[in-house]
Amino acid sequence: MTWQDRFSITGKVALVTGASSGIGAEIVRVFSQAGAKVIATGQSVERLDALAIETGCATIPADIATVEQCNTLIAKAHALHDTVDILVNSAGIVVVGPVLDFDPADWDRTMAINLRAPFLLSKGVAPGMIAAGAGKIINISSQTGVIALPDHAAYASSKGGLNALTKSLMTELAPHNIQVNAICPTVVMTDMGREIWSPPQKSGPMIAATPLGRFGEPVEIADMALYLASPASDLVNGALMMIEGGYSSV
């Protein structure tokens, strides 16, 4: 196998959640450029339609905050393709605020989208991957699932749970040649990232604590996802890939 083959996902079917914007949309672009047959899902029909025109991907609008929508998404994806070779759980929400003031409804929705949906979607695609004898599940987590940040209790808990789910899925699916990994980025300059982190008084201390001295860009996360989706990463399993400029190392 050549190096081009080892890093190739040509012809593979990839289901990417959270594709309406941000990291998910960038993963759709990179995977499409790499030759994958991408199914993009998200809540904004308008944005998904624009992405389909740009990349040629298939689209399935869905709100994966509900169990029913997760199950419907899997059924529709399998109606398009018999097997999903690559699942990227990129959908996520961030609601920040002090624990003492935090609304339980925001907690529940955070857990539903950031943690329960990846569990349900992984459970939905796993039988096909097992039958095929191969598969890749890539969870877009966060450095806040590993380190502590104020006002991020719900988000950090959801991502810490996603990291634990990644490792648990790995132990059960590895015997079937399925790799399950998580990418744990620093702040990424998506629309959501800019909204929360643009104020210098908030971003300054975070950047100062990062040896590389900057936040991330969506394509940098997409490129790591491409590596984890390719045969080049077949020995990488249960890993929490920290893409955070060295923050957690100091």
Image (cartoon, rainbow, N blue to C red):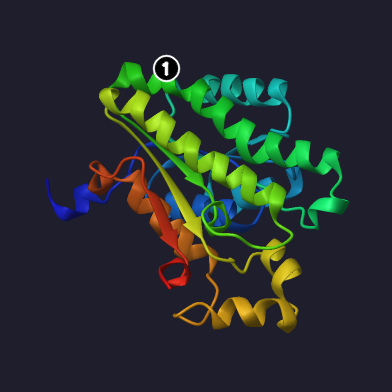
The kind of residue on which mark 1 rests is Pro
Instruction: Give percent across and percent down for residue 143.
Output: 53, 58
Instruction: Give percent across and percent down for residue 59.
Output: 62, 38
Most extreme residue toward the left, as rendered? 1
Q: Residue at x 55, y 45 (%)?
A: 160
Quarter the C terminus occupies:
bottom left
Using the image as rendered, state which of residue 32 and residue 98 is in the foreground: 98
Using the image as rendered, state which of residue 193 and residue 26 is in the foreground: 193
Q: Residue at x 72, y 42 (%)?
A: 110
Q: Secondary structure at mark 1?
A: helix
Instruction: Give percent across and percent down for residue 105.
Output: 85, 38
Using the image as rendered, state which of residue 7 and residue 93 is in the foreground: 93
Q: Residues within 10 Å of mark 1 (few under 14, many from 20)?
A: some
Number of on-image labels: 1
Q: Residue at x 30, y 28 (%)?
A: 174
Q: Quadrant of residue 195?
A: bottom right
- The residue where tag 1 is placed is 127
